[in-house]
Image (spheres, grey):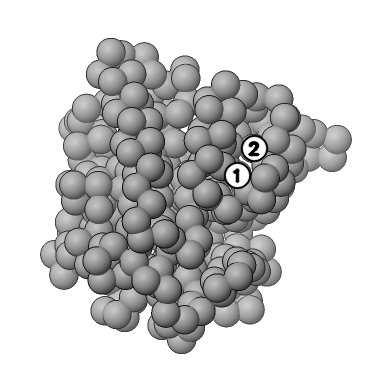
Amino acid sequence: PPFPAMAPQLAHLREIPRLGRAAHGSWDQPFEFLVVADPQLGMRNMDTTRAPDAEEEQYLAQTVKFANSVKPRFVVVVGDLVDRHAVEGEAHFRTQADALYKHLDQVHNDVPVLFLPGNHDIGDVPTPFSIAEYKSCFGDDYFQFWAGGCRFLCLNSQLLVEEALTTPELKQAAEAQHQWLTQALSTQEPQPQHTVAFMHISPALDAYDEDTAYFNLPPEPRRRLVEQLRAGGVSRIFAGHFHREARCDAGDGLEIVTTSAIGLNLITKPGGDRRNLAGIGGAVMSESVSGCRLVRVSATGITDEYVTVEEM
């Protein structure tokens, strides 16, 4: 990775070495963690230089200060770390990744920062090159870890988007993630206090049976994933991608929580379908809109609140 000091907290062999079951598989006490969505450095300049914007970096720096004051058990960035995925012959991905690491390297050493990929990190249709470059900077694209007696599953949601699976290699990768998740959920010793999943694209935004749209998963992979997670005892899915807030009851005690971006957020046009690109009526970068999610975990449940940059 650009900052080697962060290497020990990156996923390797589908696990985080410092957050294993042996050391963190038993419940001890209530704790908090932060969910950060879509820093997407370079988004404001996507049509020009693709360079990270000063305000994008400012909000990320403020989030780091907030994390150091709250001292959560961990921080997880649920995808779209950067705006431009790796393309052979381009330097944008590495430049944007360097800027991201420059700030997140300032999070206290006792607070691991974890990453999972979004569509902008590996491409709407990933390539072997884009995935390899992502992994070289941010670690495995799907993995699990333990904290405070709870199990956490991090997924590559691009492998759940059917139209993205355009090659035999991608279809094999999607099936490998499915089999890995099946195995992870079947291992119940020790019994986790809670099981939580993180992914970039939300399975559903407002209703579990909503139509397919740009900002959610198609019905069949949604059904297969949610049924698998329910059966495995998952009670929360935290996602991003939407650049707005959303919350969905997926039934049987499973709630899907979609977090607004710490970077640029989207405005829904009056009367527009907010789940589709055609429903976007503009974008806003404001301390009263951009933010992250503070999640509190107790022995009996999980609660969360959205904290704006202004409130940090």
Most foreground residue, 50 or 207: 207
Q: Is residue 112 above or below residue 201?
A: below
Q: Position of residue 124 (x, y in %)?
A: 42, 28
Residue on which disc 2 sits: 204
Where does the N terminus fall, quadrant-wise? bottom left
Q: Are marks 2 and 1 in contact (CB under 8 Å)?
A: no
Who's the residue at 64% across and 27% down the image?
213
Q: Quadrant of the C terminus?
A: bottom right
Could you say which quadrant of the image residue 212 lies in? top right
Q: Position of residue 6 (x, y in %)?
A: 21, 66
N-term mark: 2 or 1: 2
Disc 1 marks a residue whose amino acid type is Phe
Secondary structure at badge 2 equals loop
Residue 36 location (% of width, % of height):
49, 61
Q: Which residue is mark 1?
A: 242
Q: In the image, 266: left or right of 111?
A: right
Eyeballing the image, is 216 above or below 254?
above
Residue 144: x and y in percent read 33, 52
Could you give the CA–CA distance between mark 2 and mark 1, rounded to whole angstroms?
11 Å
